[in-house]
Image: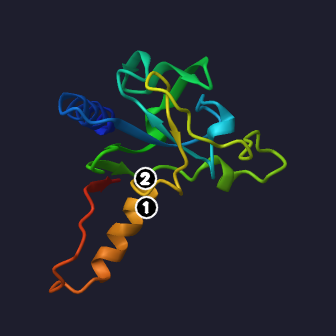
């Protein structure tokens, strides 16, 4: 018998820590065919979602799925994310959180003729009660950027006093 994954438990714990400390929990998600998010906010097969209590309704962190309702451009959408597709959860304000390995994003797996994702209309949603879509490559605290910072940090001379440390821990 295989051990159950620790990933859903870690996601719930980091989310609770963010909320308890007044931070905004962001979920970085690698989108695939099972992921239900508004496709116009997906960029490069990834989306970053604001999972704070103010931005979501009916938020549920299960062992297989993360589900909630959120507004995009004023329209309520049902969001369904397979836990296996979460690449990171972190606090928007300071980048503290945890990153996970996931399968490649949909855009990298499928060729363009089969993809149903439009990248032309990507823009953040404004308003405090809305879900914020943050382009992963443009957000300096995104999981991809933090992972790149981790790689670059290893190359920096250890005697440097300005060495920046990443606050995400990558889990396989």
Residue placed most toward the observer, 117 or 62: 117
> Residue 72, image x and y in percent?
59, 26
In the image, residue 170 sits, relative to residue 11, either above or below, namely below
In the image, residue 116 sits, relative to residue 16, either above or below, namely below
Identified at 25% across, 29% down, the residue is 19
Location of residue 121 (image quadrant): top right
Tell me the crowding category of disc 2: few under 14, some 14 to 19, or many 20 or more residues within 10 angstroms, Cα based. Answer: many
Judge whether residue 1 can be spotted in this image.
no
Residue under label 1? 145
Say what secondary structure mark 1 lies in.
helix
Residue placed most toward the observer, 24 or 152: 24
> Residue 67, image x and y in percent?
46, 21
* Left or right relative to 102: residue 98: left
Inter-mark Cα distance, 1 to 2: 5 Å
Location of residue 122 (image quadrant): top right
Say what secondary structure mark 2 lies in.
loop
Discs 1, 2 touching: Cβ within 8 Å: yes
Point out which mark residue 53 bears.
Answer: none
Q: How is the image coloured?
A: rainbow
Judge whether residue 111 can be spotted in this image.
yes
Q: Across the whole image, how many numbered discs are drawn on residues? A: 2
In the image, residue 124 sits, relative to residue 143, either above or below, namely above
Identified at 54% across, 24% down, the residue is 79
Q: Residue furthest right?
A: 113
> Residue 90, image x and y in percent?
32, 44
* Left or right relative to 150: residue 127: right
Q: Residue furthest top?
A: 58
Residue under label 2? 142
């Amino acid at each position: 018998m295989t051990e159950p994954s620790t990933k859903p438990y870690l996601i719930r714990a980091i989310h609770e820590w963010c909320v308890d400390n007044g931070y905004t929990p962001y979920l970085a998600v690698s989108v695939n065919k099972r992921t239900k998010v508004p496709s116009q906010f997906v960029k490069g097969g990834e989306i970053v979602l604001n999972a704070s209590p103010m931005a979501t309704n009916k938020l549920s962190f299960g062992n297989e799925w993360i589900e909630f309702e959120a507004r995009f451009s004023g329209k309520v959408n049902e969001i369904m994310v397979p836990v296996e597709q979460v690449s990171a959860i972190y606090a928007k304000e300071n980048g503290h959180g945890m990153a996970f390995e996931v399968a490649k994003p949909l855009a990298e797996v499928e060729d363009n003729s089969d993809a149903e994702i439009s990248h032309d209309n990507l823009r953040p949603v404004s308003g405090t009660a809305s879900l914020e879509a943050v382009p992963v490559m443009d957000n300096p605290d995104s999981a991809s950027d933090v992972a790149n910072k981790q790689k670059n940090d290893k190359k920096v001379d250890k005697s440097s006093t300005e060495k920046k440390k990443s606050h995400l821990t990558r889990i396989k």
